[in-house]
Amino acid sequence: MITGEWNRNRLLQTIVALYALYVSGLWITNALLYFAKMSLTYQSVVEYYLGSEERFLSPRSYQGLLEVSHFHLFAMGMLLLVLTHLVLFIPLRNSVKAWLVVVPFFSALLDEGAGWLVRFGHPWFAYAKIAGFLLLQTSLALLVILSLRVVFGGNQGRNYAGDPVPNPGP
């Protein structure tokens, strides 16, 4: 991968493409689940976590949030570990790679933690929930697109800025 062999290795390309397909499915279902419960409005997020007497919605329980967080923290951690690992092999400057690694992890934690903060902190954290969701979805999509572009785009020794990629040697 480091030497660019994945541009010529069909099996590795297949693995990355299938992984990208799975992550794309997760991306779609993540959005569908979010929008089945709430929208991108402050009020819908607050009602989801704090309940609504008018709509007969109960507030999210401590145990309910804990069970969801338990699964999400493990699953998202594993997903991001693999997906951001691919960033190491994308021909970009290290500073850009750092952002492509840190932002998805930060946004996943923000997305997960903001629900807790709305429920047990203050309703204004609903804006953090919306921002976390949008940032997570955007960063996941970007990572999938970049991974597929590198695998199938054939950069031929150039990074996305057009600079030559140094040969790492033997």
Image (cartoon, rainbow, N blue to C red):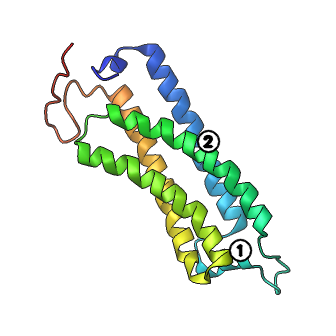
Q: Residue furthest bottom?
A: 54
- In the picture provided, is 24 more to the left or to the right than 169? right
Q: Is residue 138 visible?
A: no
Which of the two marks, 1 or 2, is nearer to us in this view?
A: 1
Which disc, if any, is residue 169? none
Image spot of residue 1 (x, y percent): 35, 22
Question: Which quadrant of the view contains residue 122?
Answer: bottom right
Residue 66 drawn above or below residue 168 = below
Image spot of residue 102 (x, y percent): 39, 51
Q: Which residue is mark 1?
A: 49
The amino acid sitting under disc 2 is Gly
The amino acid sitting under disc 1 is Tyr
Q: Residue at coordinates 37% horizontally, 37% vertically from top-left?
A: 87
Image spot of residue 33 (x, y percent): 69, 57
Q: Which residue is mark 2?
A: 25
Q: Residue at coordinates 61% horizontally, 42% vertically from top-left?
A: 25
Q: Work out whether mark 1 precedes mark 2 in sequence or the reverse, and give the earlier one.
A: 2
Residue 58 drawn above or below residue 71 = below
- In the picture provided, is 51 more to the left or to the right than 38? right
Mark 2 crowdedness (10 Å alpha carbons): few <14, some 14-19, many ≥20:
few
SS for callout 1: helix
Image spot of residue 40 (x, y percent): 58, 71
- Marks 1 and 2 sit apart, C-alpha to C-alpha, by 26 Å
Residue 169 drawn above or below residue 155 = above
Q: Residue at coordinates 39% horizontally, 46% vertically from top-left?
A: 101
Residue 13 drawn above or below residue 104 = above
SS for callout 2: helix
Q: Residue at coordinates 23% horizontally, 39% vertically from top-left?
A: 160
